[in-house]
Image: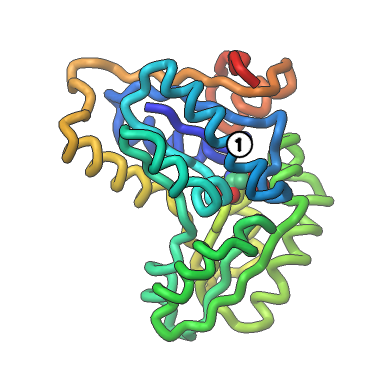
Amino acid sequence: MGVFDSGVGGLSIAKCIAEQLPHENIIYVADSLHAPYGEKSVDFIIKRVNTIAKHLMAKGVKALVIACNTATVNAIEQLRAQVSIPIIGVEPAIKPAAKQSISKKIAILTTQATSENQRFKDLIDLHHNGAQVLIQPCPGLVEFIEQGKHHSPACNALLRQYIEPLVNQEIDTLVLGCTHYPFVQQQISTIAGKHISIIETAAPVTLQLAKKLAEMNLTACHTQQGKTQFFSSLVNKQQEKIFSQLWQASLTLHTLDHN
Ligand code: DGL
């Protein structure tokens, strides 16, 4: 299957898929040359999503996972209209967060583009379950993670700037609405404190994917050991190092044919 994101964020989803569905082959594509999508126009995001989907379809993938909230809310509908294989998107886990919130005050960390998107706003209207939902766009955060600088004091300061006001407003649940953010979950958790629970989407997306594959008789044969290949629109030694660190294993990064 093809799994893609604007950059390294979708590795948080791909890792869960590789662990939970070990017989599946994965082609991971990062559009790092054009990251972050969160600061780009809707037209630009749609164009990139279509280019990458075309690339993955040419490689014969049986399903596509848009491992990016920003690309999902902006481009999944138009992609589904063009493509006949199953497409699984990633959207912020508002429903489970609102359901479990006792204070009935939750917050979502997102990219700028997601925070402005109508599909995202509709999702909140549909699933808030009476909870107040605070939306916190986090410009600059994806860049730190893309550059492998997410453990730096500067990144920590940025996280504090975004999270402390939410803590002061007494939220009890925080949704990670961008697939890059699980890579700073430890820092987020330290700033937020033990009483705030943090929700991300890798496990439910993997479950949804497994269900879809089973429904369509596309599940890989259990005798095969799945492999993961990695492609990016920006390949160099530094990128390969960042990918390997986040994947927690040494890997080879290949160049995406059609940038
Ligand atoms: N990882 C992506 C998301 O889930 C996009 C981040 C970006 O490129 O701005 O929204």
Residue 61 is situated, as x and y percent measured from the top left of the image, at 36, 23
Q: Residue tagged by mark 1?
A: 47
- Given residues 135 and 247, the one toward you in this image is 135
Q: Give the quarter of the figure containing the C terminus.
A: top right
Q: Which residue is drawn at 58% across and 50% down?
A: 70
- Given residues 2 and 170, the one toward you in this image is 2
One can see residue 183 in this view: no
Q: Going by the image, does 152 lie left or right of 11?
A: right
Q: Which residue lies furthest to the front in this view?
A: 82
User: Relative to residue 234, is residue 65 depicted above or below?
Assistant: below
Residue 102 is situated, as x and y percent measured from the top left of the image, at 43, 83
Q: Residue at x 26, y 40 (%)?
A: 210
User: Relative to residue 91, is residue 57 depicted above or below?
Assistant: above
Q: Residue at x 31, y 41 (%)?
A: 209
Q: Going by the image, does 81 lie left or right of 213?
A: right
One can see residue 64 in this view: yes
Q: Residue furthest right?
A: 154
User: Relative to residue 4, is residue 61 depicted above or below?
Assistant: above
Residue 13 is situated, as x and y percent measured from the top left of the image, at 46, 40
- Given residues 233 and 131, the one toward you in this image is 233
Is the residue marked 1 within 8 Å of ligand 1, measured from its CB?
A: no
Task: Please tell me how crowded label 1 is: few (under 14), some (14-19), or many (20+) other residues with Cα within 10 Å.
Answer: few
Q: Going by the image, does 177 lie left or right of 190?
A: left
Determine which quarter of the picture holds residue 44. top right
